[in-house]
Image (cartoon, rainbow, N blue to C red):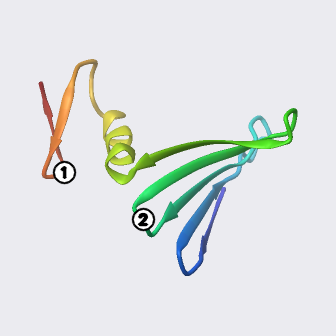
Amino acid sequence: MFTVEFDTTQSVITSIDDNGRADDIEMIVSDSNFIHIRQYIEKSKRFEVVTMTMEQFFELIKSLDCPEGSYHIVNRKVSGV
């Protein structure tokens, strides 16, 4: 399950594990073209955050369809190095 919320400066997508095995993950897409992925850690009572550019996020998504190797993305197409 996931939720989508829009604000004036960002969008927040929350992924919820329906089976309760993992804590919720939030992806915050800001107007500055950065993506922040965060998860609240109950033990430390704080969020762990990873920040990346939109290009890095796109590369991660595209990498799921690639075999082992090194790649460049040119014009939104993946090519091996």
Q: Left or right? Give the position of 11 relative to 70.
A: right
| Placement of 55 over or under 64, stated as above or below | below
Which residue occupies 79% across, 43% down?
46
Which residue occupies 54% across, 51% down?
36
The amino acid type, in three-letter code, at marker 1 is Arg
Find the distance from the CA under tag 2 to the CA under tag 1: 20 Å
| Placement of 63 over or under 2, stated as above or below | above
Q: Position of residue 74 (x, y in %)?
A: 13, 45
Q: Left or right? Give the position of 68 relative to 5.
A: left
- Say which element carries label 2: loop
Q: Position of residue 79 (x, y in %)?
A: 12, 34
In this view of the protein, which residue sits in the foreground, 61 or 38? 38
**Looking at the figure, which quarter contains the N terminus?**
bottom right
Q: Position of residue 65 (x, y in %)?
A: 31, 34
Q: Quadrant of residue 11?
A: bottom right
Q: Position of residue 26 (x, y in %)?
A: 64, 53
- Say which element carries label 1: loop
Q: Quadrant of residue 7?
A: bottom right
| 10 Å crowding of disc 2: few (<14), some (14-19), many (20+) | few
In this view of the protein, which residue sits in the foreground, 26 or 53? 53
Q: What residue is shown with label 2?
A: 32
Camera-near label (2 vs 1) is 2
Q: Quadrant of residue 27?
A: bottom right
Which residue occupies 86% across, 41% down?
45
Which numbered circle lies on residue 76?
1
Which residue occupies 42% across, 65% down?
32
The amino acid type, in three-letter code, at marker 2 is Ser
